[in-house]
Image (spheres, rainbow, N blue to C red):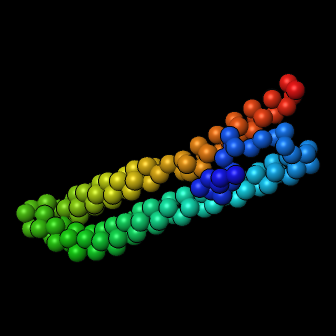
Amino acid sequence: MPETRSGGQAAGDFNAAEHSLGELVSETSGNISRLVRLEIELAKLEIAQDARKVAKSLGMFAVAAVLGHLFIILLSITIGLSLWAVGLAPWLAFLIVTVFYLFVAGLLSFIGIRHLKRLQGLPRTSATMAASMAALRRERSAEAEA
């Protein structure tokens, strides 16, 4: 019997009439066990891929935070003093600077959250699990009719 890429046997090549009930049950339980192992392996691969994307997003957040702090500390003093020199009251000059940097921080957070929302979970695992469950349901309904 030819094997598929995953190591199982092709569905059309198996003749159930040539095997006893015990052999069929054994073959079925072996196939289900192999299917579960393959599903778990696929889930692990997808989780590792998503973990890399999450790590990249978290790295972007960290870099944005460090640069944001440096930027706020150095540039806000410079801009605040410049606004004060132009003629604004010191508290108003530094309030304007603070509100501006609050807006920048909000924008960076929005971009990071939008990037994280693009993650889709485990699409291939979900699809193969749905197909596997549908195939098992058809087998059960065929057994119930017989």
Q: Residue at x 9, y 62 (%)?
A: 87
Q: Nearer the viewer, residue 111 or 98?
A: 111
Q: Residue at x 91, y 44 (%)?
A: 21
Q: Is residue 58 above or below residue 100?
A: below
Q: Nearer the viewer, residue 49 or 102?
A: 49
Q: Position of residue 39 (x, y in %)?
A: 66, 54
Extreme residue toward the top, this view: 145
Q: Look at the image and tell me whether residue 84 can be seen.
A: no
Q: Is residue 14 above or below residue 51?
A: above
Q: Residue at x 70, y 43 (%)?
A: 13
Q: Residue at x 81, y 51 (%)?
A: 27
Q: Position of residue 7 (x, y in %)?
A: 66, 58
Q: Position of residue 25 (x, y in %)?
A: 87, 47
Q: Nearer the viewer, residue 57 or 96?
A: 57
Relative placement, left or right, of 20 versus 16 is right
Extreme residue toward the left, this view: 86
Q: Look at the image and tell me whether residue 105 can be seen.
A: yes
Q: Is residue 26 above or below residue 97?
A: above
Tally of numbered discs: 0
Relative placement, left or right, of 143 versus 92 is right
Q: Nearer the viewer, residue 30 or 130?
A: 30
Relative placement, left or right, of 86 versus 7 is left
Q: Which image quadrant is residue 71 in?
A: bottom left
In which quadrant is the C terminus drawn? top right
